[in-house]
Image (tube, helix red, strand yellow):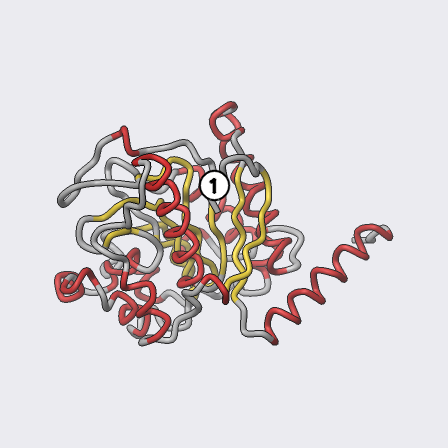
Amino acid sequence: MVLNRREFIKASALALLATRLRADNLSQVVLARNSDLFRYPQRKEEIIGEMLDQACRLIFQSESLYDFLAKKVKPDDYVGIKSNVWRYLPTPAEVENVLVKAALKCGVSQNRVSVNDRGVLKDEVFKRATVLINVRPMRAHAWSGMGSCLKNYIMFTSRPADYHPDSCADLGALWHLPQVKNKTVLNILVLFTPLFHGVGPHDFNPQYLFEYGGMVVGEDVVAVDATGARIIEAKRKEFFGYEKPISPPVKHIELADKKYHLGNSSAEKIKIHFWGDQQNRLI
């Protein structure tokens, strides 16, 4: 590919910024939003693909999601796409499709790619997985305060209840399990219609959904979740008209940083790149 002068300058600036951010130990995430998801549902997969391509350009200096994955995924890899099947707000099939197609384009055969949630411990691809992609919608959660990317790996243990005490404070420990550690190349927190409030286990009330049309994307799972939590906190304040912190408190995000050393949780250590719709972004 030949870059014109404008593209070359932009690419060089992004590369320089990435170098500076690494030197400052900052994590990079992208908040990509596109309200066309609601206006043109028949084009949903195409729109999601563009959002992920743009995210990869901004933080990885890759031309597309495929170009980014091609640096991480080889034909002999086993690729597990950890999804979420909660019946009220599952990972959209269109997001899963985009990820599967990108993995296959990297030369991985179909029998080495799997999308799964509750069956990962019995899934032959996940048993052999060398690469993981973590993707799920964000929602209020009665035990952890927020169900997001960190919590999405609770199905990698046969004893999920062991991680429930103290508002699921030790979810970060999941990321040091042998079947998970150092395998995740991308975290995608889906905020198309996030659930910002709930009461009790598995509570779902559609009045607490809102059309946001976004995704938070990054390598640092802690930074991704911390950014999502800030958006949800802002939405709760807007909706209720006063400060109404997430309940129970999402202490597992800070502990994933301070105790389990998985990434950055403080806003000062996270560089957010914005792409797409800026109106009412809440952050």
| Residue in the picture at 23% in, 68% down | 170
| Residue in the picture at 40% in, 58% down | 226
Question: Could you tell me how many numbered marks the image carries?
Answer: 1
| Above or below, comparing residue 25 to residue 185 in the picture | below
Residue placed under numbered mark 1 in the picture: 214
Q: Is residue 283 left or right of residue 146?
A: right
| Above or below, comparing residue 241 to residue 140 in the picture | above
Question: Could you say which quadrant of the image residue 111 lies in?
Answer: bottom left
Q: Is residue 129 left or right of residue 28?
A: left
Q: Residues within 10 Å of mark 1 (few under 14, many from 20)?
A: many
| Residue in the picture at 30% in, 44% down | 139
Q: Secondary structure at mark 1?
A: strand
Question: Could you say which quadrant of the image residue 25 lies in?
Answer: bottom right
Q: Is residue 145 left or right of residue 275?
A: left
Image location of residue 279, percent across then percent down: 54, 35
Q: Nearer the viewer, residue 248 or 67?
A: 248
Q: Residue furthest front?
A: 242
| Residue in the picture at 30% in, 36% down | 240
Image location of residue 208, percent across then percent down: 28, 33
Image location of residue 62, percent across then percent down: 65, 57
Q: Nearer the viewer, residue 274 or 282?
A: 282
Q: Is residue 204 left or right of residue 272?
A: left
Q: Residue furthest right?
A: 5
Image location of residue 200, percent across then percent down: 13, 44
Label 1 sits on what residue type? Gly
